Image (cartoon, rainbow, N blue to C red):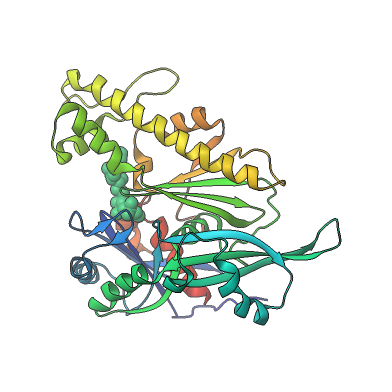
């Protein structure tokens, strides 16, 4: 039985360090639910975080300090998320053993499953369950997480450099799933939902693709095809600065995939609409192919599901006009926008900022929820 604390003042803080923004969410239990008591977001200088990895530790520390000055969060203990090419999540099948034995064995087993040297990695695992094979072998399913030690070291340094204490490191995709679908054991509340769900979180430097199957995130891939790449494509085609292309991307977006109708404000030069949409369409088609490859890969790895019919879409980049319609058509799946406030209700103090950033807030909220669990 998990316990619920009524009116407890205990709260957890999630800190999401991204390419464009650092975001913070403070969550506390209230009654039978949870409240987002504090929220904030500040911009990070370009180049300080590249494809989910911290490159300039000092710049990130300064941005975090600024975030604490500007948002109504209270406390120094934080949970952060990692999502980049140096953190790997794999679902593996091993002969059944007790947890204590697995703790010793995982060091030796892991190298077969991860493309990084085990000596340079920090390993963690979660036992998902056990089962009997048709040949009567007792097996277990283990979710293995490996993260590059140096990459984690930079994250720790950035947090400590801001005068905070890092109490938990989470995989960002787990946080996304937790925020959108709830938290239970081991990661999700309802494991009886037999249909696999794809979760796509598009931000600026990375897209996080996850498959949740039988209540557990069983697959995760990080792609660098994300918002910045869409912007860069427009900048290249029209020979514009990144900032000019960014503004056009947001204003023009894609047309409606069925009717071809666009929703473009009058201030935009009409001669630019077509080239912007053509380059966005090219990028989005690449994006769809990438997502499809990931989902297909997952489907070839499992005998349990044949298709993924439902997709939850989040992340600031998901606001690209008509992206959901393009994905729906391209992936032949129902695409819904994920709700970061499904399980955590913003307090009146946090409401305004959080709702304005509802697409971008998912990771920070999920990280804070994870911090409450432990
Ligand atoms: N209305 C909009 N239409 C299209 N794209 C948008 C819109 N609003 C924001 N974006 C895009 O979202 C991206 C910014 O996302 P966000 O701030 O969440 O990134 P991040 O979390 O800092 O980075 P990371 O990729 O490292 O997680 C940018 O590419 C931006 O262009
Ligand atoms: Mg992000």
Q: Tell me where residue 44 appears, x and y as whole percent.
A: 21, 58
Task: Tell me what residue is drawn at x 25 percent, y 26 percent.
Answer: 276
User: Which residue appears at 34% of the width and 47% of the height?
Assistant: 316
In this rendering, is residue 352 above or below 256? below
Quarter of the image where the N terminus is located: bottom right
Q: What residue lies at 25% left-to-right and 80% top-to-bottom?
A: 163
218 to 252, vertically: above or below: below
Visible in this render: residue 346?
no
In the drawing, does residue 213 fall left or right of residue 285?
A: right
Please say if 72 is above or below 53.
below
* Quarter assignment of residue 346: bottom left
> Image quadrant of residue 239?
top left
Residue 261: x and y, percent?
36, 19
Apparent side of residue 171 relative to residue 303 in the rendered image (left or right):
left
Quadrant for ligand 2 reads bottom left
Image: 198 above or below 167 = above
Residue, x 53% and y 74% (percent of image)? 373
Q: Position of residue 271 (x, y in %)?
A: 18, 18
Q: Which of 84 and 1 is in front in this view?
A: 84
**Where in the figure is residue 164, as x and y percent of width and height?**
29, 79
Q: Can residue 13 be seen in this view?
A: yes
Q: Which of 374 and 3 is in front in this view?
A: 374
Count every numbered label the image shows and give the total. 0
- Front-most of residues 41 and 8: 41
């Amino acid at each position: 039985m998990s316990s619920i604390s009524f009116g407890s003042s205990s709260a957890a803080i999630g800190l999401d360090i991204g390419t464009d923004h650092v975001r913070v969410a403070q969550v506390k239990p209230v009654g039978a639910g949870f409240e987002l008591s504090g929220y904030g977001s500040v911009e990070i200088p370009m180049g300080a975080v590249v494809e989910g990895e911290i490159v300039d530790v000092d710049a990130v520390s300064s941005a975090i300090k600024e975030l604490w000055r500007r948002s109504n969060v209270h406390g120094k203990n934080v949970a952060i998320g990692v999502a980049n090419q140096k953190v790997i999540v794999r679902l593996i099948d091993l002969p059944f053993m007790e947890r204590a034995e697995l703790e010793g064995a995982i060091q030796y087993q892991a190298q077969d499953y991860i493309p990084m040297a085990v000596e340079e990695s920090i390993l963690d695992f979660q036992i998902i369950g056990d089962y009997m094979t048709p040949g009567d072998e007792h097996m277990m399913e283990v979710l293995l997480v490996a993260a590059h030690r140096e990459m984690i070291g930079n994250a720790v340094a950035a947090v400590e450099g801001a005068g905070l204490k890092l109490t938990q490191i989470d995989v960002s995709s787990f946080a996304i799933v937790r925020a959108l679908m709830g938290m239970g054991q081991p990661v999700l509340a309802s494991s009886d939902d037999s249909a696999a769900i794809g979760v796509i979180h598009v931000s600026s430097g990375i897209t996080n693709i996850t498959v949740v199957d039988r209540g557990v995130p069983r697959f995760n891939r990080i792609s660098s095809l994300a918002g910045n790449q869409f912007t860069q494509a427009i900048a290249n085609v029209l020979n514009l600065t990144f900032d000019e292309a960014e503004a056009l991307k947001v204003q023009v977006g894609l047309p409606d995939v069925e009717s071809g109708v666009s929703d473009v404000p009058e201030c935009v030069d009409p001669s630019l609409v077509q080239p912007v949409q053509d380059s966005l369409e090219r990028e989005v088609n690449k994006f769809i192919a990438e997502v499809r490859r990931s989902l297909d890969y997952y489907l070839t790895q499992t005998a349990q599901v044949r298709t993924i019919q439902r997709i939850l879409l989040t992340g600031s980049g998901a606001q690209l006009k008509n992206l959901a319609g393009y994905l729906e058509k391209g992936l032949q799946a129902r695409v819904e926008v994920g709700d970061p406030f499904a399980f955590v209700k913003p307090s009146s103090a946090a409401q305004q900022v959080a709702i304005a950033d509802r697409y971008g807030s998912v990771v920070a909220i999920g990280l804070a929820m994870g911090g409450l669990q432990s």
